[in-house]
Image: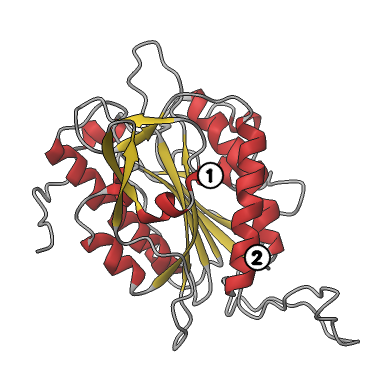
């Protein structure tokens, strides 16, 4: 029998205001570091032109917009639509601040080749009911991110670990009906004076083209793994790819069977770079690339003369280099 949802109550505005990265310089720095290693992989998969959208506290940094360009911006959740940045990053994003909840971009549904989401969640230990609410909220945000992309578009989201580790697989199974998991990374928590920081996951989902089969990584179930004299549970993707949990792990302090990383950030940038390189290589082999992307030639599969490497992002919004929503 499948587990049932214990609580579907939404998080309050006050809880969301204490969310990931709302005014936290360390969270902004994390998003910037992720972007430095994320974008080379995205370009290698063919996501080089077209439009991207961002939602959340630090989605501008995920787009390659340097933190120092945000001088004077008030803490909060933002939204934007802009051209996919070049190799030098983005400096032309105009931010649109919303209220306490994650902004929505319904007018751009199905139009954004890349969607970046910094999904808010509590930065303190959660009761089982709160953990379930966080998983429900995160699954809803991932679903909305996928809906903003065209077929073959990609959504990259920073979410609470309970989204992937929730014992109830319903939300993940609903996601798997429309998207393929390109890969995921579990980041170690940021050290804080009170020790209450929470790890977060980077989840990459590609909206499945019409009629295509699922070629993504399995991620709907959880696995039990041996840890010392006991057992702990973690998403099946991380059980199969422990190298994508970026740091040592230990059981959750609340006595549950969940497995969480220790706040060890030694060589984090190098580990991020290596992990994204692995994810990109596996995505190319599985065909999880941008629409119309032609796999680069290799010695075993030479490219025919005159063949162009192209990306088809479908219909684009009629705008300049940046849209102020």
Q: Nearer the viewer, residue 195 or 262?
A: 262
The residue shown at (58%, 80%) is: 314
Question: Dot 1, crowdedness within 10 Å: few (<14), some or many (≥20)?
Answer: some
Q: Are marks 1 and 2 in contact (CB under 8 Å)?
A: no
Left or right position of 215 against 14: right
Mark 2, Cα crowd under 10 Å, few <14 / some 14-19 / many 20+, is many
Callout 2: SS: loop
Q: Nearer the viewer, residue 19 or 227?
A: 227
Q: Quadrant of the N terminus?
A: bottom left
Displayed quadrant of residue 145: bottom left
Of all residues shown, which one is farthest toward the top?
193
Residue 47 - label: 2
Q: Is residue 251 above or below residue 226?
A: above
Q: Which mark is residue 243?
A: 1
Q: Earlier in the sequence, mark 1 or mark 2?
A: 2
Question: Residues under labels 1 and 2: Cα distance?
Answer: 25 Å
Q: Nearer the viewer, mark 1 or mark 2?
A: 1
């Amino acid at each position: 029998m499948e587990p049932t949802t214990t609580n579907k109550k939404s998080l309050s505005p006050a809880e969301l205001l204490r969310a990931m990265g709302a005014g936290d310089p360390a969270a902004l720095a994390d998003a910037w570091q992720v972007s430095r290693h994320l974008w080379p992989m995205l370009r290698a998969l063919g996501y080089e032109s077209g439009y991207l959208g961002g939602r959340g506290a630090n989605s501008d940094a995920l787009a390659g917009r340097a933190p120092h360009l945000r001088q004077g911006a008030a803490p909060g959740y933002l939204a934007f639509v802009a051209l996919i940045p070049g190799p030098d990053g983005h400096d032309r994003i105009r931010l649109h601040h919303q209220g306490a909840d994650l902004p929505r971009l319904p007018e751009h549904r199905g139009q954004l080749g890349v969607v970046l989401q910094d999904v808010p969640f509590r930065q303190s230990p959660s009761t089982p009911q709160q953990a379930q609410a966080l998983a429900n909220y995160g699954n809803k945000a991932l679903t909305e991110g996928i809906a903003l992309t065209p077929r073959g578009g990609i959504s990259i989201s920073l979410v609470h670990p309970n989204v992937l580790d929730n014992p109830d697989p319903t939300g993940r199974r609903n996601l798997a009906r429309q998207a393929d998991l390109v890969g995921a990374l579990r980041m170690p928590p940021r050290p804080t004076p009170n020790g209450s920081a929470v790890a977060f996951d980077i989840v990459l989902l590609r909206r499945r083209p019409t009629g295509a089969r699922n070629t993504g990584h399995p991620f709907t179930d959880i696995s039990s793994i041996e840890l010392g004299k006991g057992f702990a549970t973690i998403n099946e993707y991380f059980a199969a790819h422990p190298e994508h949990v970026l740091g040592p792990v230990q059981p959750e302090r609340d006595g549950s069977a969940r497995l969480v990383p220790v706040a060890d950030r030694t060589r984090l940038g190098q580990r991020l770079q290596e992990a994204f390189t692995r994810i990109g290589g596996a995505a190319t082999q599985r065909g999880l690339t941008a629409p119309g992307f032609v796999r680069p030639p290799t010695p075993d599969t030479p490219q025919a003369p005159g063949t162009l490497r192209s990306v088809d992002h479908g219909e684009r919004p009629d705008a300049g280099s940046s849209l102020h929503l």
